[in-house]
Image (cartoon, grey):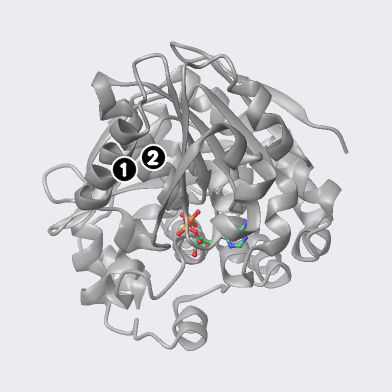
Amino acid sequence: VRARTIRVETAPAYDVRVGPGLLADVDAATSSYSARAIVTDENVAPLYLGKLRASAWAAHVTVPPGEDSKSLVVVEHVLDFLVESGLDRRSCVVALGGGVVGDVAGLAASLYMRGIACVHVPTTLLAQVDSSVGGKTAVNLGRGKNLAGTFHQPALVLADTTTLATLPDDELRSGLGEVVKTALLDGEEALAELEARAEALVARDADALADVVARCVRLKASIVARDPREANERKALNLGHTFAHGIEHAAGYGAVPHGVAVAVGLVLALRAGIELGVTRDAALVERVEALHARLGLPRSLAELSQRHAVRLDDPRDLIVGMLHDKKGAAGAPRFVLLEAPGRWRIDVAAPAGALERWLA
Ligand code: ADP
Ligand code: ZN
């Protein structure tokens, strides 16, 4: 397997490189900056910091792993570290870790001296296929998730697929949920590739992972280039997410990995689409359920609640979370639905009483 390069044509444009062994390239790829500083977490540091040859060229700071680190307090701590490390406007922040590290480091980089370069080195499948590309950064506030953030496109993304070998199974599955989402948005060819390689992905086959990550990045790059600020088309990337936010809220944030909630959200969105006459191929839902089963993903609220020991049997709990979804205009949740693989419809409102039915 060799590394591939995908260009993201935002302003400014940047490259996403995907493949095995890219950790070894981080040093050279960032050597022209006046100074570099690494942000990582306590799980990733012992595994991969040494592979960047970090001690030789940059200071680092570790944040505690997990969603609780997505806070303004942690961002301030990182900003203090950037000052102490002597970074100036020509310096760069290197984000080494999953989506949490990417959000915290990306937000700190976008604030420090009104914005300096951020190089993302994503080490989770979810961060490689989704969150490291597109320039969204955010932390949580007491009143809700991702309420404080910026758009700050990275200077470069280096997705080393060998880092996925050490990922916990739950985190791999979480990434696979976003992979299925991306394939459904991409189209028939991407979906068929995923179906052909489901077992290889679960076995963490190096070729399969690199191919699938690269394909997901290509689709996300093209959507983000056309709509960087999520005015329209980029909303499609929220397929399954209105339901997922309901699930995450009802289960208690952190109880279910995000991408696993998205996986169930995809099935619910397809069922909703069939009921509303938007999804024309009724067999698509069975096809996705079969794929989920092979990828180790739950296919229903019942299966999810059983596996993660959470209660999801009261639709009202989920609806509260869906109403909190900040993308819903004026309190009414909006859905992305699929007409067919590769053909989506955004901003669909649910008819009265439909939510209760879909979640029952
Ligand atoms: P996400 O990327 O899904 O948003 P996080 O940033 O919270 O998630 O990372 C998920 C968990 O996986 C964290 O505990 C993190 O420390 C850990 N982690 C990240 N990358 C790796 C890796 N390559 N190997 C092992 N654990 C990892
Ligand atoms: Zn997501």
Pointer 2: what residue?
Answer: 105
C-alpha separation, residue under disc 1 versus residue under disc 2: 7 Å
Q: Amino acid at mark 1?
A: Val
Secondary structure category for the residue under label 1: helix
In the displayed structure, does residue 63 sit left or right of residue 19?
Answer: left
Residue 271 image position (x, y, % from top left): 48, 62
Q: Amino acid at mark 2?
A: Ala
Q: Viewer-proximal residue, 188 or 237?
A: 237
Q: Viewer-proximal residue, 142 or 308?
A: 142
In the displayed structure, does residue 151 sit left or right of residue 10?
Answer: left
**Residue 292 vertical position relative to residue 60 in the rendered view, above or below:** below
Secondary structure category for the residue under label 2: helix
**Total residue callouts:** 2
Q: Is residue 151 visible?
A: yes
Pointer 1: what residue?
Answer: 78
Of circles 1 and 2, which is in front?
1
Residue 199 image position (x, y, % from top left): 81, 64
Q: Is residue 327 visible?
A: no
Q: Are marks 1 and 2 in contact (CB under 8 Å)?
A: yes
Q: Residue at x 26, y 47 (%)?
A: 77
Quarter occupied by the C terminus? bottom left
Residue 251 image position (x, y, % from top left): 33, 77
Q: Residue at x 77, y 43 (%)?
A: 210
